[in-house]
Image: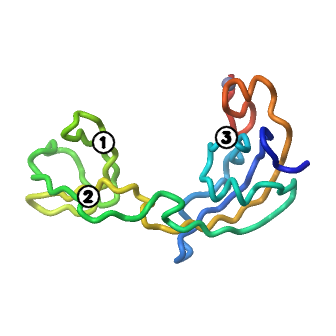
Amino acid sequence: MKITQDHVALLEFELTSDAGEVLDTSQGRQPLAYIHGKGGILPGLEKALDGKTTGDEFKIRIPAEEAYGKYIDGMEQRVPRDQFPAEMELLVGMQLQAKGPDGQVHPVMVTEVAESEVVLDANHPLAGVPLNFAITVKEVRPATEEELGHGHVHGPGGHQH
Ligand code: ZN
């Protein structure tokens, strides 16, 4: 069966950076399940999957601009260390929730920890990173009425309810 509009596809994938670092993988867990044509996955990836069938294996590189966006300078914020609880361990690469001036909570990443201050970056951790996917299509089937109504996949790799 081919992956077309309103079909469920189950994918095994490995996501690596250009340097070959594994950023994410389905290995050791359920395959990724999505409904085709609903914009639930990155548009470049969805386009590449169009018309693929069970057993197909392929690789695709998605430029940063079509994935999590370019890295934007000036989104760092220097915060005095004493604004964090003293017992809190702060490590580079750690993700935190920060309240912005608008009162909204945004995810930020710790990029520098000094004695007196901490640098937080509001860019997405994968901003500026081209994504290299290695994909294997494990299963393709039509989505059920219920799945289309809910907008998500039921069963393995999807919602269990
Ligand atoms: Zn549901």
Q: Residue at x 23, y 63 (%)?
A: 112
In this rendering, which labeled residue sits more in front, label 2 or label 3? 3
Q: Earlier in the sequence, mark 2 or mark 1?
A: 2
Residue at image mark 2 = 75
Quadrant of ligand 1 in image: top right
Circle 1: element type: strand
For mark 3, does the 10 Å Cα neighbourhood hold few (<14), some (14 to 19), or many (20 or more) residues? some
Circle 3: element type: loop
Q: Earlier in the sequence, mark 2 or mark 3?
A: 3
Residue 97: quarter of image: top left
Closer-to-camera residue (37/22): 37
Q: Earlier in the sequence, mark 1 or mark 3?
A: 3
Give the quarter of the figure containing the C terminus.
top right
Circle 2: element type: loop
Closer-to-camera residue (133/66): 66
Residue reaching furthest to the right: 1
Q: Give the color scheme: rainbow, by chain, secondary structure or one colour.
A: rainbow
Residue at image mark 3 = 38
Give the Cα distance between marks 2 and 1: 15 Å
Q: Position of residue 91 (x, y in %)?
A: 28, 57
Residue reaching furthest to the bottom: 19
Disc 3 marks a residue whose amino acid type is: Lys
Residue at image mark 1 = 97
In this rendering, which labeled residue sits more in front, label 1 or label 3? 3
Q: Position of residue 133 (x, y in %)?
A: 65, 64
Q: Residue at x 57, y 58 (%)?
A: 24
Q: Residue at x 15, y 42 (%)?
A: 85
Disc 2 marks a residue whose amino acid type is: Met
Disc 1 marks a residue whose amino acid type is: Gln
Give the Cα distance between marks 2 and 3: 31 Å
For mark 1, does the 10 Å Cα neighbourhood hold few (<14), some (14 to 19), or many (20 or more) residues? few
Please give left or right for residue 146 compared with residue 20 in the image.
right
